[in-house]
Image (cartoon, helix red, strand yellow):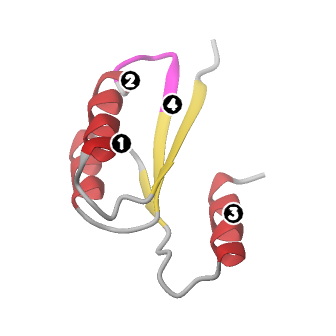
Amino acid sequence: MSRVAVVHIISGDLWAGPENQLVTLLSALRHDERFAVRVITLNDGVLVERLRQLGVPVAVIAEAGRSFFALVRAVAAELGP
């Protein structure tokens, strides 16, 4: 059985409700063999640290200094073909 790829894209610059919810969700999903989870964040910080502690693959694509279109291209490149 192939695993369903689940990629969450989140700003991640704060530690608040959405970030906490994502950690809670992925702490459960990472044990479910049906899913291959990973996260793309647009900022480094507490969220990245907590996800890495859980063993969730995280890519940080810094949004600072990038135009919207450059950011979209970088995220698309991280997602692959």
Between the residue at mark 2 and the residue at mark 3, the CA separation in whole angstroms equals 24 Å
Residue toward you, 27 or 22: 22
Q: Is residue 68 left or right of residue 64?
A: right
Of the numbered discs 1 and 3, the one sitting upstream in the chain is: 1
Between the residue at mark 3 and the residue at mark 4, the CA separation in whole angstroms equals 18 Å
Q: Are marks 3 and 4 in contact (CB under 8 Å)?
A: no
Position of residue 7 relative to residue 75, above or below, is above
Q: Residue 77, which numbered label? A: 3
Q: Residues within 10 Å of mark 4 (few under 14, many from 20)?
A: some
Q: Residues within 10 Å of mark 2 (few under 14, many from 20)?
A: some
Q: Amino acid at mark 3?
A: Ala
Residue at 68%, 77% in the rendered image = 70
Give the position of the N terminus as an image quadrant.
Answer: top right
Q: Residue 56, which numbered label? A: 1
Q: Are marks 2 and 3 in contact (CB under 8 Å)?
A: no
Q: Secondary structure at mark 3?
A: helix
Q: Are marks 2 and 4 in contact (CB under 8 Å)?
A: no
Q: Amino acid at mark 1?
A: Val
Of the numbered discs 2 and 3, the one sitting upstream in the chain is: 2
Q: Residue 10, which numbered label? A: none
> Which span is picked out in magenta?
31-36
In this figure, which residue is indicated by the disc labeled 2?
29
The residue sitting at the top extreme is: 1
Q: Residues within 10 Å of mark 3 (few under 14, many from 20)?
A: few
Q: Amino acid at mark 4?
A: Ala
Q: Secondary structure at mark 2?
A: helix
Q: Secondary structure at mark 4?
A: strand
